[in-house]
Amino acid sequence: MSDWISFYDFKHSVIYVNARHRDVHYDLIARDIRAFVPSPDARVMDYGCGEAKSADLVAAASGHLVLVEAAPNVRAALRARYQDHPKISVLAPEEALALADGSLDLIVMHSVAQYLTSAELERLLAQFRRLTKPTGMLVIGDVVPPRFSALAAAFALLRFAAAHGFFWAAVFGLVRIFASDYLRLKRRIGLAHYTEAQMLARLAAAGFEARRAARNIGHNQQRMTFVARPASR
């Protein structure tokens, strides 16, 4: 995953076509995550949160929100943004995974699984199982299916852009992708893909009882979200 971390540690016009895209993207993600928060006193972790520009929306519905980000520059920006927020803390992955057993009511990992190797995902799910309370929940969002259509993804972005006022910026952004470092890196390393059955099996092997959610977190409904709870031992 180190190559992807290095890529996302810097601002790229290929990721978000403009500031409007970035803002509405993070706003939607935060609102979707907020819907999973089980109670106003819940301790929540957003693992691989990215810029998390609307994290305050999740924090407002929680007792405390832990933002976890591997990219050093992004993490430093998060700490600067939320340093005075009483309900948000920002941790590196190794710090987050050192938290006490059973200390979290909700763990969300959105749009990260595709960048992990099979072994990395297995180890991380085992750690999430340890960190989750017996009554807690794990949500894995934006899982990419094997026959994922790039054309369908492009149309999903354009529909999202049209609804939020940045359609033409999105059109030009899609053109830029063809000459981007993202596409070259994707071709060289690839992304991890899972069927619904494969992801459910992964979660079961890690000690969770899981189901596919009715809709994916975020705008792209070609991808999948899974909701899991610790299985009885």
Image (cartoon, rainbow, N blue to C red):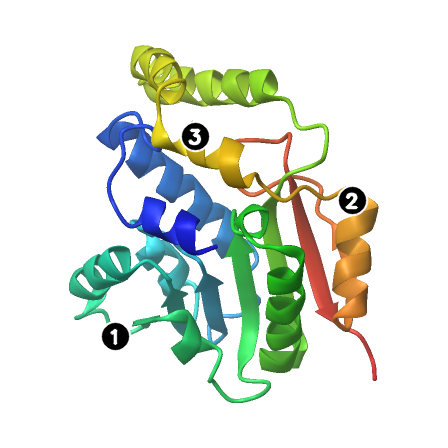
Distance from Cα at disc 1 to Cα at disc 2? 38 Å
Q: Are marks 1 and 2 in contact (CB under 8 Å)?
A: no
In the drawing, does residue 27 fall left or right of residue 218? left
Q: Are marks 3 and 2 in contact (CB under 8 Å)?
A: no
Q: Amino acid at mark 1?
A: Pro
Observer-side mark, 3 or 2, equals: 3
Q: Quadrant of residue 160?
A: top left
Q: Amino acid at mark 2?
A: Glu
Farthest residue in the front direction?
Answer: 188
Give the percent coordinates (x, y) of residue 187.
52, 31
Q: Secondary structure at mark 1?
A: loop
Give the percent coordinates (x, y) of residue 149.
64, 22
Q: Quadrant of residue 68?
A: bottom left
Q: Quadrant of the C terminus?
A: bottom right
Mark 3 closeness class: few <14, some 14–19, many ≥20 residues within 10 Å: few
Mark 1 closeness class: few <14, some 14–19, many ≥20 residues within 10 Å: few
In the drawing, does residue 162 fall left or right of residue 32? left
Mark 2 closeness class: few <14, some 14–19, many ≥20 residues within 10 Å: some
Q: Residue at x 78, y 44 (%)?
A: 196
Distance from Cα at disc 3 to Cα at disc 2? 27 Å
Residue 105 shows up from this direction: yes
Sequence-earlier tag: 3 or 1: 1
